[in-house]
Image (cartoon, helix red, strand yellow):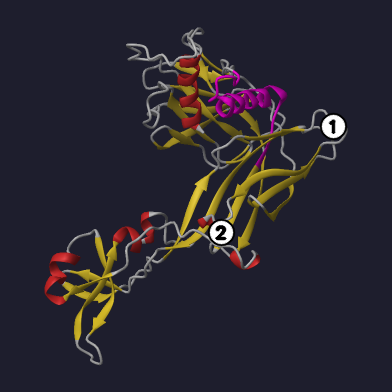
Amino acid sequence: MPRLHAYLLGLLLWLTLPGCVDPFEPDVISSPPSYLVVSGFINLSGPTTIRLSRTQGVANTAAPAVEAKATVTIRDEAGTSYTLTEQTPGTYTSAALSLNPARKYQVRLRTAAGRDYASALVTPKPAPPIDKITWAVENRGVQLYLSTHDASNVTRYYRWTYTETWEFHSAYRSGLQYVNGRMEPRTEDIFQCWGTAGSITIELNSTARLNQDVVANYPLILLPPSSVKLRFKYSVLVRQYAQTPEEYAYWEQLKSNTESVGGLFDPVPTQLTGNVQCLTDASEPVIGYVGAGSVTEKRIFIASTELPLTQRYETGYNCAAPDTVPLPSVPAVFSSPAVLPLYTVYAPMSNTIVGYSSASTECTDCRRRGTNVRPDFWQ
């Protein structure tokens, strides 16, 4: 999401220039403005994470520059402050907090350059529980649906994020390792791994125009029929946020700007107005909206055994067949980190070793695409 914010403003600056239907490339836009992007949410019951980055030009495909070495705090209306520490450059996290829901909260920060910023004081909104996450096999793939409600009819504005985790296997299994000039049994499993991905779309829904505050079967995630995520086992952790009308409007505009741009007749992106301002210079644009409240979560699993037997899944690999490395070539071949041994090759009808089968590390070591550490929550 920080990259999404940073990319967006560069896009807005470019698209709002006057022009014609024919493509126009200006001679020089060498230094587009680099505005601060503040991403995050004040969590009343747990750690709060705030990410700081900078906007960049639309033609810049590199990751947005992060705002490191800033001082970031949560402050309530009574003046009580809670410090966030920088975990990785540009990412600041607090300890697990239990904040008073009756107070208003804001984020205050000072950059390494000495410029001060603050989000508006906001009233926390508690999120109701997620009722259920269901799924169905449809023509376009496996569709996941979310249902929730608020019996008191006060939530009305919802946002969701999620983290996907799936088991996958490398193309080939390696039972050997070449260490210090010797072939020996492999002790670490590099065949079975788990991949993880966060949500990259903005998922919102409002019940403001409904009599009851009920979200029924919101289509949250669509997994293509052949998705590698479904080959063995898939899990998703969904987080639910309750929003104020103002916060919802911000995210709705951000969603519109990022998903509607592309065609000649698509709506032109508009300037985002968040709730973060620069205290040092009130005229400086700042991108971001920091809300506050509680977060509710729900996790589900989908095993491949629950899906139709006719399903065919991608492996995620496009690998050549294993090769046999004769004994004289073993030192030269397996001294390279690009190739790994798979198993011992014997002469026909004999126990004589003639070589070792081999495959590329990319096709053999699943850690190249994930982790071989089993998640604590995995079933």
Local secondary structure at mark 1: loop
Question: Which residue extends farthest front?
Answer: 22
**Residue at position x 57%, y 37% from top?**
201
**Residue at position x 72%, y 36% from top?**
126
Mark 2 sits on what residue?
A: 230
**Between 4 and 295, which is closer to the camera in this rendering?**
4
Q: Horizontal and vertical percent for residue 119? A: 57, 21
Q: Earlier in the sequence, mark 1 or mark 2?
A: 1
Quadrant of image for the C terminus: bottom right
Toward which corner of the image does residue 326 lie, by quadrant?
Answer: bottom left
Tag 2: residue type?
A: Leu
The local crowd at label 2, few if under 14, some if 14 to 19, many if 20 or more residues have their Cα within 10 Å, is many
Q: Horizontal and vertical percent for residue 132? A: 74, 51
Question: Above or below — where is 306 with respect to 59?
Answer: below
Q: Horizontal and vertical percent for residue 27? A: 32, 11
The local crowd at label 1, few if under 14, some if 14 to 19, many if 20 or more residues have their Cα within 10 Å, is few
Mark 1 sits on what residue?
A: 210
- Per the rendered image, the range of residues in magenta is 240-267
Q: Horizontal and vertical percent for residue 41? A: 59, 32
Kindly report the distance in space between the C-alpha atoms of the residues bearing marks 1 and 2. Answer: 36 Å
**Between 279 and 75, which is closer to the camera in this rendering?**
279
Residue 373: in magenta span: no
